[in-house]
Image (cartoon, rainbow, N blue to C red):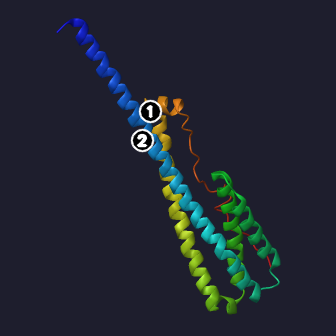
């Protein structure tokens, strides 16, 4: 074999190798981005489930604690903000606000023993608690997928492909700074 033929074969092998790498890297980023989007959709589904439970819970509490209108209004307003949120950050902030309002509502419930023993309230509370657990799991899964995706897109040489094909960094679903604060409810 001629030396020039060998050089062309080596060049062809290198080019084919680079093409295979590029296709594989691109497909990997697409798969990971879809996993992030799917995990976010799971959060969204659970947030919607919780938002759908809230009117029933508020109406049940209203029947027993009609004078607690400020808290009822804050829950309703927070629910509306969550329904109108579109970005990850907006949903996270609205979710934190709704969680805080629900926590204040549950503190109010403690003052109404008849309400706490109502079968309808017990059932709604159980459904809400189950939904909160689902939301926590969905958040954790989403953040894990975001971490994997963001780490992959920053690794060399995948970062070159990510830049060429505009794979943007995904935001985490984070709790607000005041999420760990206990709500202050006065009567």
User: 114 or 38: which is nearer to us?
Assistant: 38
- Looking at the image, which residue is at 61% across and 65% down? 47
Does residue 57 appear left or right of residue 140 in this picture?
right
- Point 72% across, 70% down: residue: 101
Secondary structure of residue under mark 1: helix
Q: Earlier in the sequence, mark 2 or mark 1?
A: 2
Q: Quadrant of residue 169?
A: top right
Between 4 and 34, the residue placed more toward the observer is 4
Disc 2: CA contacts within 10 A as few (<14), some (14-19) or many (>=20)? some
Q: Residues within 10 Å of mark 1 (few under 14, many from 20)?
A: many
In the picture of the structure, the residue carrying the numbered disc 2 is 28
In the displayed structure, 67 sits above or below 12; it is below
Image spot of residue 14 (x, y percent): 32, 21
Q: Is 72 situated left or right of 10 in this image?
A: right
CB-based contact (under 8 Å), mark 2 and mark 1? yes
Residue at 64% of width from left, 76% of height from top? Answer: 53
Q: Is residue 82 above or below residue 22?
A: below
| Image quadrant in which the C terminus is located | bottom right
* Residue in the foreground of this view, choosing between 48 and 60: 48
């Amino acid at each position: 074999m001629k030396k020039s033929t060998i050089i062309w074969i080596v060049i062809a092998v290198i080019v084919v190798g680079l093409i295979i790498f590029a296709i594989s890297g691109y497909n990997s980023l697409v798969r990971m981005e879809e996993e992030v989007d799917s995990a976010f959709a799971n959060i969204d589904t659970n947030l919607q489930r919780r938002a759908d439970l809230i009117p029933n819970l508020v109406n049940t509490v209203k029947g027993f604690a009609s004078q607690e209108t400020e808290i009822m209004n804050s829950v309703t307003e927070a629910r509306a903000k969550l329904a109108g949120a579109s970005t990850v950050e907006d949903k996270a902030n609205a979710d934190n606000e709704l969680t805080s309002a629900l926590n204040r509502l549950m503190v109010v419930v403690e003052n109404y023993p008849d309400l706490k023993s109502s079968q309808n309230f017990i059932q709604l509370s159980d459904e809400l608690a189950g939904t909160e657990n689902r939301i926590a799991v969905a958040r954790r899964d989403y953040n894990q997928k975001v971490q994997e995706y963001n780490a992959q897109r920053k690794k060399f040489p995948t970062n070159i492909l990510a830049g060429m094909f505009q794979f943007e960094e995904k935001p985490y679903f984070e709790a607000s700074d005041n999420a760990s604060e206990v709500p202050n409810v006065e009567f």
